[in-house]
């Protein structure tokens, strides 16, 4: 048998009303948690019992949810009124202009300009920021130089290996040619005199070893 349908109206019996409130409150909080987790929503739930007892749940904090709600409600009301919308946009422009001025001042301070208005503590903080920035730049520079040196070393090794292979090929080819030519020359015949070719003494040397 299915459970009977409960009429949605005030429960007269105080005990039954309290039991129903406790069960449904727990179910409502559970659903709010699931909604916040599954849908990545910011949820705030505030419940006052008939006796004035407070129960609350929030995915972040009740204060943050309330502030966001008030701000969103205010913006919504301002957008409905053209005059309020203009004031809202003007305020936003003023805030952005102030942020831009602050960024420009910070940039001038980083460049070492207009430091006369800064105190000792502000100057110390600025010096610490510059030291951290300089350290990051140096680390990046050292890494770039290390990568470049490794790349040059790799290319140098490739060139050295190619020279060694070329030397082996030329050296082996010279011995093979000398053996084949001598097999066809008659005994006692001077090849240099017959071909009237000046004698040139050639010597092939291996490539120099690299010093690292």
Image (spheres, rainbow, N blue to C red):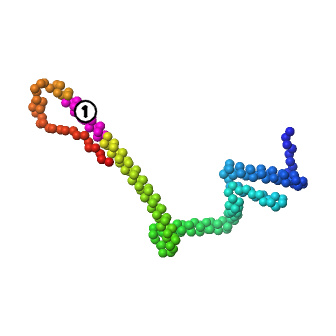
Q: Which residues are magenta?
A: 162-178
Determine which quarter of the picture holds residue 199.
top left
Q: What is the x, y in percent for residue 9?
A: 87, 53
Position of 37 relative to 90 (above/below): above
Q: What is the x, y in percent for residue 137?
A: 44, 59
Residue 104 shows in the view: no
Q: Residue drawn at (22%, 33%), measured in percent from left and top?
A: 174
Dot 1 falls on a residue whose secondary structure is helix
Instruction: Tell which residue pokes out farthest to the bottom in this image.
Output: 116
Residue 96, magenta (yes or no): no
Position of 169 relative to 183 (above/below): below
What residue is shown with label 1? 172
Q: Residue drawn at (45%, 69%), measured in percent from left and top?
A: 112
Q: What is the x, y in percent for residue 84?
A: 67, 67
Task: Bin the neighbour count of mark 1 within 10 Å (Cα to Cα): few under 14, some 14-19, many 20 and up.
Answer: few
Q: What is the x, y in percent for residue 196?
A: 10, 33
């Amino acid at each position: 048998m299915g459970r009977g349908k409960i009429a949605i109206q005030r429960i007269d019996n105080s005990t039954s009303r309290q039991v129903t409130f406790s069960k449904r409150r727990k179910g409502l909080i559970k659903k709010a948690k699931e909604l916040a987790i599954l849908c990545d929503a910011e949820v705030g739930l505030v419940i006052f019992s008939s006796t004035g007892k407070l129960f609350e749940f929030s995915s972040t904090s009740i204060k943050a949810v309330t502030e966001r709600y008030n701000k969103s409600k205010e913006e919504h009301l301002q957008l409905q009124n053209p005059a309020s919308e203009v004031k809202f946009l003007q305020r936003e422009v003023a805030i952005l202009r102030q942020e831009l001025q602050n960024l420009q001042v910070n940039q001038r301070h980083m460049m070492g300009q207009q430091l006369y208005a800064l105190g000792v503590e502000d100057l110390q903080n600025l010096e610490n920021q510059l030291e951290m920035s300089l350290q990051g730049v140096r680390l990046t520079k050292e890494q770039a130089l290390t990568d470049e040196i490794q790349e040059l070393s790799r290319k140098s090794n490739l060139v050295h290996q190619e020279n060694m292979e070329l030397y082996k090929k030329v050296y082996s080819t010279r011995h093979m040619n000398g053996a084949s030519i001598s097999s066809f020359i008659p005994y006692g015949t001077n090849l240099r005199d017959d071909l009237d070719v000046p004698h040139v003494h050639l010597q092939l040397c291996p490539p120099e070893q690299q010093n690292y």
